[in-house]
Amino acid sequence: AWTGDEGSRAVPEDPVRCKTLASRLDVLLKKLDGVKHENGSLRVEIDAIRQQRIQLNGIFERLKVEIRQRTAQLADFVEETEASRSVHNDAKLRVGVMRRQREVERNNFKSEVMRIRKDLQKTDHERKEIEVQLKRASEGVQKKKELIIPLEEHGFSEACMMRRIMKAAFLNCIQRRHIK
């Protein structure tokens, strides 16, 4: 049986029952305080985790931006390297072509010099033969011990003649190069 008005708090009349309810209330209040305390500490922990997550998200975003920048930089470096490699290969090809062309020109020049040298030797030999024949015709047969030396050969310099030949061949080579 409860006493009290309907609008006011009902209080049990039985003191044993009242004590039991008070002890239950005490136990439940202690549990409630424990749960509230645990809830508070969990909230603090959750707030710390949230704060840490916000910081880590900021760091993560900065790292993503930095990775994008590094990736773009790396792509630029790769592109520059490819361009440099392409230029290097082109230069190698041009050097190879120039070397082959130089060898061809050198061989042509050499063969031209040899041909001119043979022509000079041939004309020199023919000239000597003609001089010998003329001298024989005018003086008769000479003694075999004496060498026939034409007048032009007294002042002849082989080195000077070779310089003139080389100069003419070189100028011809240059002129041919300009014509091509």
Image (spheres, grey):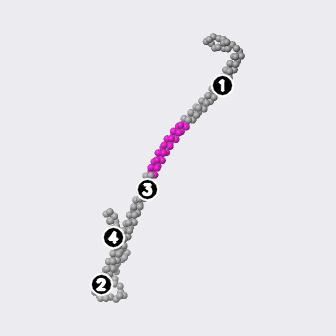
Image position of 88 (left or right of 149): right
162 lies above or below 4:
below
For marks 2 and 4 on the same chain, the one whose residue lies earlier in the sequence: 2
Image position of 154 (left or right of 43): left
> Number of labelled discs?
4
Q: Position of residue 112 (x, y in %)?
A: 35, 70
Q: Is residue 166 visible?
A: no
Say which residue label 4 marks. Answer: 168
Is there a contact, CB below 8 Å, between mark 1 and mark 3? no
Q: Position of residue 58 (x, y in %)?
A: 53, 37
Q: Report the span colored magenta.
A: 55-81
- Residue at left offset 40%, top offset 64%: 100
Say which residue label 2 marks. Answer: 133
Q: Amino acid at mark 4?
A: Ala
Q: Position of residue 140 (x, y in %)?
A: 29, 88
Say which residue label 3 marks. Answer: 88
Tell me which corner region of the image, top left, top right, bottom left or bottom right, holds residue 171.
Answer: bottom left
Q: Per the image, is 73 magenta?
A: yes
Describe the element under mark 1 as helix, strand or loop.
helix
> Dot 2, how many residues are within 10 Å of its Cα: few (below 14), some (14-19), or many (20+)?
some
Q: Amino acid at mark 3?
A: His
Q: Nearer the viewer, mark 1 or mark 2?
A: 1
Q: How far separated are the C-alphas under marks 3 and 4?
A: 38 Å
Q: Amino acid at mark 1?
A: Lys
